[in-house]
Image (tube, coloured by chain):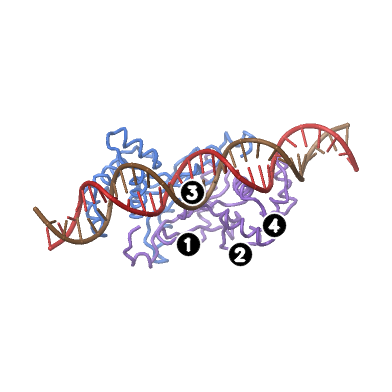
Chain colours: A blue, B purple, C brown, D red
Amino acid sequence: MAYTANSLKAELNERGWRLTPQREVILNVFQNLAEGHHLSAEDLYNELQSQGDPISLSTIYRTVKLMARMGILRELEFAEGHKHYELNQPYPHHHHHLICVKCNKTIEFKSDSILKLGSKTSEKEGFHLLDCQLLIHAICPQCQRSLLPG
Amino acid sequence: MAYTANSLKAELNERGWRLTPQREVILNVFQNLAEGHHLSAEDLYNELQSQGDPISLSTIYRTVKLMARMGILRELEFAEGHKHYELNQPYPHHHHHLICVKCNKTIEFKSDSILKLGSKTSEKEGFHLLDCQLLIHAICPQCQRSLLPG
DNA sequence: AGAGTATTGTGTATTATTCTCAATAAGTGA
DNA sequence: TCACTTATTGAGAATAATACACAATACTCT
């Protein structure tokens, strides 16, 4: 279920919220993002600047948070100290992350059994599922060899 | 494999690091923590103050990060904007989290198939596994009913 | 078209976490 | 056991991500 301006509007209005040009443009950026890419708030800010749609940082923070809570975006927390966002795609595109805690190298992988487990678990507790992600913290081959602390 | 002062020391020294009273005390706090509990840096700071082992916040931040990278602690990122830590326990205690993104209510659940998938995946890529956690973002029954924004 | 109110942008505030650096102390080898 | 090297600590300042306040704007509904 890819979002269009109209379906986004419908879903916002249903909750008493509004479709604004800013929200539409931000959604578009994520929809045009190559698979496996994700943006921080800062990245998104810069991207919008350079494509000629300047949007304030406040609005960006508010919008990605809103969209994450609507289930449109996924909030990814790697080890760099800030969040990243990407479209929350269903089954064939849904993926997970293996992350090196030293150098932040990230490898994506897929698993539909996790998706099933996620929906089964939230359903059992009466929760409305937004996103489920398996987060693997590990040390990559290169960083295993280096003995640097930290 | 529960840590003792000695095994912690051995593991630290192996990498050229040192066992300090602070590190020992911090590990103890986590080992005495009831199952299902986890501490923020601030929590840990207060706990240490009140048990008569004051340790500076700097040291606390450094130590939990170190221990997470050693695989001794798990770093949990819920939605409150700060990290929580707990002992990284093996199989029968290892668990995952279902989190309400609105009120932060957290439910723990177990799954050994995830643990297997985590180690299989990191092994395949040559990574040294530290921790794997399935993170389910969802909205709890109470918050589904409330129509409050945010 | 107009009323009502959600949303935006600007600037400021907050908060978690990291950094700096001098003082201390753990590990090591004689 | 003692001295040496250097990792670690504590205090405070610095940083960086994110939230907030509020006046101005602009959706949505009638």
For the residues carrying marks 2 and 4, which lies nearer the camera in this image? 4
Q: Which residue is mark 4?
A: B53
Q: Which residue is mark 1?
A: B106
Tell me if C23 is positioned left or right of A126 in this view. Answer: right
Work out whether residue B15 can be spotted: no
The secondary structure type at the circle numbered 1 is strand
Q: CA distance from mark 4 to mark 3?
A: 34 Å
Residue at 51% across, 55% down: B113
- What crowding class fits label 1: few (fewer than 14 Cα within 10 Å), some (14-19), or many (20 or more)? some
Q: CA distance from mark 2 to mark 3?
A: 24 Å
Disc sitting over residue B34 in the figure: 2
Tell me if D29 is positioned left or right of B148 in this view. Answer: left
Which kind of residue does numbered mark 1 sit on? Thr
Tell me if A23 is positioned left or right of A150 in this view. Answer: left
Work out whether residue B34 can be spotted: yes
Asked if marks 4 and 1 fall on the same chain, the answer is yes
Q: CA distance from mark 2 to mark 4?
A: 19 Å
Q: CA distance from mark 3 to mark 1?
A: 17 Å
Of residues A70 and D20, the one drawn nearer to the viewer in this rendering? D20
Q: Which residue is mark 3?
A: A135
Tell me if A37 is positioned left or right of B71 in this view. Answer: left
Q: Chain of mark 1?
A: B
